[in-house]
Amino acid sequence: MDELLSVWAPRAQRLAAVADGKRIELIKDEQDWWRPAAELPADLLSALGSREVDYGFLVDDDQQPLPDPRSRRQPDGVHGLSRSFDPEAYDWHDQRWTGRQLAGMVIYELHVGTFTAEGTLVSAVERLDHLVDLGVDAVELMPVNAFNGDHGWGYDGVCWYAVQESYGGPAAYQAFVDACHQRGIAVIQDVVYNHLGPSGNYLPRFAPYLSEGRSNTWGDTVNLDGPGSDEVRAYIIENALMWLRDYHVDGLRLDAVHALSDTRASHILEDLAAEVDALSAHLRRPLTLIAESDLNNPRLISPREAGGYGLTGQWSDDFHHALYADLTGDTSGYYADFVSPSALAKTIERGFFHDGTGSSFRGRSHGRPLDTEHVPTWRLVVFSDNHDQIGNRATGRGCRPSSIIGSSSSQPC
């Protein structure tokens, strides 16, 4: 139980925990981990062993407790107290589930908040049979880790270990995965490790989770190679293993890995792939890692024995761009390079269109050839649409190919 009230916080001068209304003083060890200074009171131990307990951390002179960086539940939102959660309490019914390989898989991208009118994991279960009838092999859940408010896209999450409470929280998540497996559907969870949202991000109060002075499109970069980065990398890898182990998830879609700034000899993606492969062997079922990357870098999906990172697959933006430009005639932005039908043919045959060729959108050459003799092309996940191409556009649904093909509109997306 002491581990629940332990936290890595090298930036704190003083630290105390508040649990079930009681203040618990903490002391720091040589690795900057703070733990209870004395044995926990008997009534608190009893409470922790019999029910969920609200808790948080008081950093220095704070009067308001902050959430646990590894919180599993945030019942009152990302600014409120954390709540303990035992992932082993759930009674699973997927013992016959042996998993699915990525090769040949039909994936359905699903946003919990808009998939049903209720916008919950419980209501989503009621529509799983429809997905089975469609021939779906896996659902790819857009991020469900806790974000500020009740409604969101998912990519501004701040509590990476907690399941968004308005979706139903962690127990509902387990029940959803269980229901999918009983229908023969795999679950791939979209996770964001390249940035944190702006509201409710208290991690910098505890430790150097972010790199000051280094930023990407969405804000400060995550500290993967600076002082203190060993613990930050462990924080990420353990989070990934949590989804696969505690929630029986079958794979992860890694958001925008090109924004993971890592200069260390062993890249965080390589370390993650090795840990996930070890867990896969232990669980005796396939576990999938799919990278979203715009780098067209074959190293992501090349075996570690050949100097690659050893990820299972990566999204193929080139396929989408070539297909979209061919069907709609849109030549705006990065679509300009894909206007010729030969672009689609090259992408189908060779995996990448930009494989060292010039990119007019970037104003330079881009990509590297994919060795299709040694790297199977099923490692490229192809799609005619995704959330980026619809949800991140000003016209939204109007950017669906089905809305553009045959219409008189020439507005670019």
Image (cartoon, grey):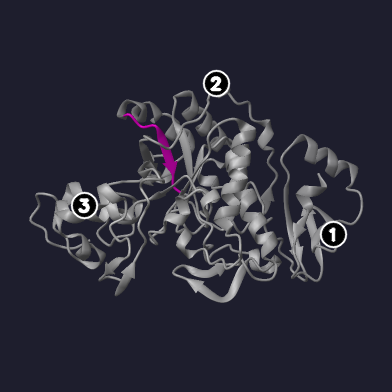
Q: Position of residue 302 (x, y in %)?
A: 47, 50
354 or 369, nearer to the observer: 369
Mark found first going from the N terminus, 3 or 1: 1
Q: CA distance from mark 3 to mark 2?
A: 41 Å
The residue that disc 3 covers is 344
In the depicted structure, whether residue 23 falls above or below residue 92? below
Kind of element beneath mark 3: helix
Amino acid type indicated by mark 3: Leu
The number of numbered discs placed on residues in the rendered structure image is: 3
Q: Residue at x 47, y 29 (%)?
A: 180
The residue that disc 2 covers is 96
Q: Would you say residue 65 is visible in this rendering?
A: yes
Magenta residues (range): 135-142
The residue that disc 1 covers is 26
User: Which part of the image, by quadrant, shows the C terminus?
Assistant: bottom left
Kind of element beneath mark 2: loop
Crowd band around label 1 with a 10 angstrom C-alpha radius: few (<14), some (14–19), many (20+):
many
Q: CA distance from mark 3 to mark 1?
A: 60 Å
Amino acid type indicated by mark 1: Leu
**Numbered disc in front, either 3 or 2:** 3
Q: Position of residue 284 (x, y in %)?
A: 59, 30
